[in-house]
Amino acid sequence: MSFSQVTLVEAVARLVKVQLVPGPVAPGKESRLASRFLGRRKSGELLLAAPQGKRGKVFLSPGSRIGMVFAVAGQTYQAQSVVVDHCLFQPNPARRVDAVVIKRPEKVTCLNQRSQPRWEADVEHAPFASLWPAGSISEDATPAPRVGRLANWSSEGMGLLFDQPLHLEDGAEVIIRLEGRTMPEHPVYRAALRHCTPRSEGGFLAGFAEVTELGPGQAVPIMESLATTTEPD
């Protein structure tokens, strides 16, 4: 079996708790739901306990995409899947529980593995971070940035904290500008999203790889866009 298959088998066998992040999240809806692995069908589909939000059970429509974050033996993993159906799962003859059926994730990523040293930012003095999807930047109309704060960094990676999920696909290319009062200039980076993980204490940690600072003359159209002031109508 592959690494992803072995990890999922372990999660099901241990009845591991899992956080579900439905996407996209409609305004006013909960962005993090609690669930647990219940079983695995011979077809490979997985059974999870009906997701629970602050107001009780939450119905996930068949075909909707979900992010999954769970831990097995001290290692934290992330995966993505699609809701197939809902059913009644019978773990034993005397008990039935509401369950959601999902497709077996094709890829499971371990979030604990790091090949490079990582430095944590000072929580009280961490720079702000403005983020734009790279494809949204144009000289005519650059949208308002998504604003977070620096959490950590390595030689080619960066972690940013946000109040809301980014709703971007894994691998999405982004532009990041770090902004701090004590910084002599606000550096601009190009990066690729690797994960956006809900935190137990609230908010979301977004991890980025392939982080490259944009030097003078390397991305003139992007710099022109960021330098353009949007005038009110």
Image (cartoon, rainbow, N blue to C red):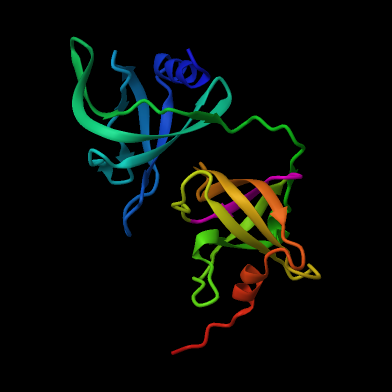
Q: Given the current orientation, which residue lies at the most extreme bottom position?
A: 233
Determine whether, in the image, residue 92 is placed left or right of residue 154. left
The residue depicted at 72 percent of the width and 61 percent of the height is 214
What segment is highlighted magenta in the picture? 154-163
Left or right: where does residue 200 sit relative to residue 42? right
Comparing 115 with 151, the one in front is 115
Image location of residue 170, percent across then percent down:
50, 43
Residue pictured at 49% horizontal, 19% vertical: 7
Q: How many marks?
A: 0
Q: Residue lying farthest right?
A: 184
- Decide which of 224, 6 is in the foreground and name it: 224
Q: Is residue 157 rendered magenta in the image?
A: yes
Which residue is at the front of the view, 58 or 56? 58
Where residue 109 appears, as percent x and y from the top left, is 53, 30
Seen in the picture, residue 84 relative to 230 is either above or below; the reply is: above
- Front-most of 118 and 169? 169
The quadrant of the picture occupied by the C terminus is: bottom left
Q: Is residue 65 above or below residue 219?
A: above
Residue at left 35%, top 51%?
A: 24
Give coordinates of residue 74: x percent, y percent. Answer: 58, 24
Image coordinates of residue 163 in percent, x first then y, are 50, 56
77 sits to left or right of 175: left
Which residue is drawn at the image coordinates 63% and 60% (left, top)? 176
